[in-house]
């Protein structure tokens, strides 16, 4: 075995050149080589109390899988990870490890933490490239469970139950399985072939996927029980976009980030002659500062925008997006207009000619400058308007990325299902709702959150369902 690596800095992630990647949808991060992965793994101290595991929502045995990498046993490392996670190639790419497992790493006290996420990605990619052995389908236990939604919480719940012999069917409203992983996260951050591979692995374990089924419309939760399912897990996500309620939001060229990304990611609007079009080129303003805003801004750039602005009402220190995504956006030339808040979306209107093809289109966005005041209830400094500081930015497209809420469809069609004032389904510590044998997790409960937290909720519910049905 190689010597311990006591470097204070982790191995850098190879990436596409910023000037090149800004014009293609290929993955930005290129991944570690075997040599880089082993070298990074040697930075792990294999702590006995494993603080990194406590920072992981799905409790991956992190020191154990890293030890396997040190030995060059990459498939062994993969097997360790998949005891806890059904989506390792996904998590290695989009999980915010810097605020979770890596934030607990002892090496981070006097330097940079071990690149746990990068190592997880390496292991999953190595397995997907070199391993041809089919997963073993467990013996059936005679129980049936329905899962609503094929996003990270639904797929995790389904995978954990399938490994225990349950007959699991996942009902997905769209025509492709993966939920937010396929419609929300761009190709350059998470290639869709990676998601398809993870879904295919679950199918080989026995999970059935039914697409184009809108539970709450084509089927109800009650009808699922009538079909013989003994428990239902709702992982329908938070697909209802929020808007600001300012003038001009109905103009042509105003999108929610959900619509903008879905048109590009799932409906392939980036093609030369797409069936589902999207505004391309010109100048684009993306309102918001989270990961979704970064995704929308970087997508707009790749679709041909000549200029892209991030308009955010707080400062860079309060920006909620991952640092890596912000840095990549800056490198690609996206301009950050911070401490600014939109007050109106401006549009062209020719009242003398209703047939004027320019009528109703976005021409700009009016903003007011902000300053940070006292902390709010969440401890974040509240942005306050500076009177008389209004200004305009000339743009052709505006993308609103200020959060999403759970879709009310399932609640409105499921009697006795309690929700909170934000529309999130109310659950107990096991994911059980106010309805007997109905569980929920992920964004349908919390509102928009991280992929890994949704996976953790799916894992919790799967454990509770198994305990309830195996009595």
Image: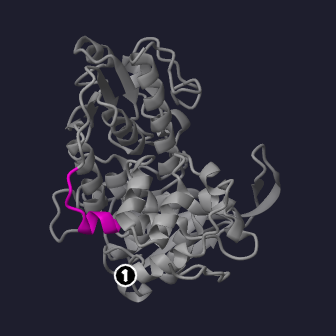
Instruction: Read off the magenta span.
Output: 125-134
Front residue of this view, candidates 196 and 401: 196
- Image quarter for residue 218? top left
Number of callouts: 1
Q: Is residue 450 visible?
A: no
Q: Position of residue 431 (x, y in %)?
A: 51, 27
- Residue lying at the far front of the rendered structure: 1
Label 1: element kind? helix
- Image quarter for residue 234? top left
Front residue of this view, candidates 376 and 344: 376
Quadrant containing the C terminus is: top left
- Magenta: main secondary structure equals helix
- Residue lying at the far right of the rendered structure: 374
Q: Is residue 389 visible?
A: yes
Front residue of this view, candidates 129 and 411: 129
Q: Residue at x 31, y 64 (%)?
A: 127
Q: Is the residue 198 above or below the residue 347 in the image?
A: above
Q: Position of residue 310 (x, y in %)?
A: 54, 68
Q: Residue at x 40, y 56 (%)?
A: 88
Q: Is the residue 34 above or below the residue 88 in the image?
A: below
Q: How is the image coloured?
A: one colour
Q: Which residue is mark 1?
A: 21
Q: Position of residue 206 (x, y in %)?
A: 22, 37
Q: Per the image, is 282 magenta?
A: no
Q: Is the residue 221 above or below the residue 47 in the image?
A: above
Q: Position of residue 28 (x, y in %)?
A: 39, 76
Task: Describe residue 230's horizontal placement relative to residue 459 as left or right.
Answer: left
Q: Residues within 10 Å of mark 1 (few under 14, many from 20)?
A: some
């Amino acid at each position: 075995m190689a010597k311990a690596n006591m470097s204070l800095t982790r191995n850098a992630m190879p990436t596409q050149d910023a000037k090149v990647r800004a014009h293609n949808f290929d993955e930005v991060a290129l991944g570690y080589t075997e040599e880089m992965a082993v070298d990074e793994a040697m930075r792990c101290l294999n702590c006995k109390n494993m603080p990194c595991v406590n920072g992981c929502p799905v409790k991956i045995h992190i020191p154990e899988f890293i030890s396997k990498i040190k030995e060059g046993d990459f498939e062994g490392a993969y097997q360790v990870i998949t005891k806890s996670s059904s989506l390792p190639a996904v998590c290695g790419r989009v999980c915010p490890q810097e605020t979770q497992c890596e934030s607990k790493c002892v090496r981070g006290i006097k330097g940079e933490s071990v690149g746990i996420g990068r190592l997880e990605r390496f292991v999953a990619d190595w397995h997907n490239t070199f391993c041809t052995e089919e997963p073993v389908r467990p013996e059936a236990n005679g129980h049936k469970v329905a899962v609503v939604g094929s996003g990270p919480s639904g797929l995790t719940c389904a995978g954990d139950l399938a490994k225990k012999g349950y007959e699991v069917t996942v009902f997905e409203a769209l025509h492709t399985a993966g939920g937010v992983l396929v419609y929300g996260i761009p190709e350059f951050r998470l290639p869709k072939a990676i998601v398809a591979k993870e879904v295919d692995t679950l199918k080989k374990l026995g999970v059935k996927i039914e697409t184009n089924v809108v539970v709450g419309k084509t089927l109800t939760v009650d009808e699922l029980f009538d079909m013989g399912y003994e428990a239902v897990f709702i992982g329908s996500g938070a697909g209802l976009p929020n808007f600001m309620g300012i003038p001009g939001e109905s103009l042509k060229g105003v999108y929610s980030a959900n619509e903008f990304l879905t048109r590009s990611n799932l409906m392939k609007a980036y093609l030369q002659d797409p069936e589902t079009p999207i505004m391309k080129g010109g100048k684009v303003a993306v309102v918001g500062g989270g990961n979704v805003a970064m995704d929308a801004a970087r997508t707009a750039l790749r679709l041909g925008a000549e200029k892209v602005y991030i308009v955010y009402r707080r400062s860079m220190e309060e920006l909620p997006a991952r640092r890596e995504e912000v840095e990549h956006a800056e490198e690609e030339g996206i301009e950050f207009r911070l401490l600014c808040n939109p007050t109106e979306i401006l549009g062209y209107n020719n009242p003398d000619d209703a047939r004027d093809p320019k009528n109703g289109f976005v021409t700009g966005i009016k903003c007011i400058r902000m300053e940070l005041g006292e902390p709010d209830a969440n401890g974040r400094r509240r942005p306050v308007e500076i009177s008389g500081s209004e200004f305009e930015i000339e743009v052709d497209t505006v993308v609103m990325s200020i959060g999403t809420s759970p879709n009310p469809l399932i609640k409105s069609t499921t009697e006795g299902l309690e929700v909170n004032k934000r529309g999130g389904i109310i659950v107990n510590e096991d994911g059980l709702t106010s309805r007997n044998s109905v569980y929920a997790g992920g964004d349908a409960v919390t509102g928009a959150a991280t992929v890994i937290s949704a996976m953790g909720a799916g894992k919790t519910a799967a454990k509770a369902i198994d305990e309830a049905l195996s009595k």
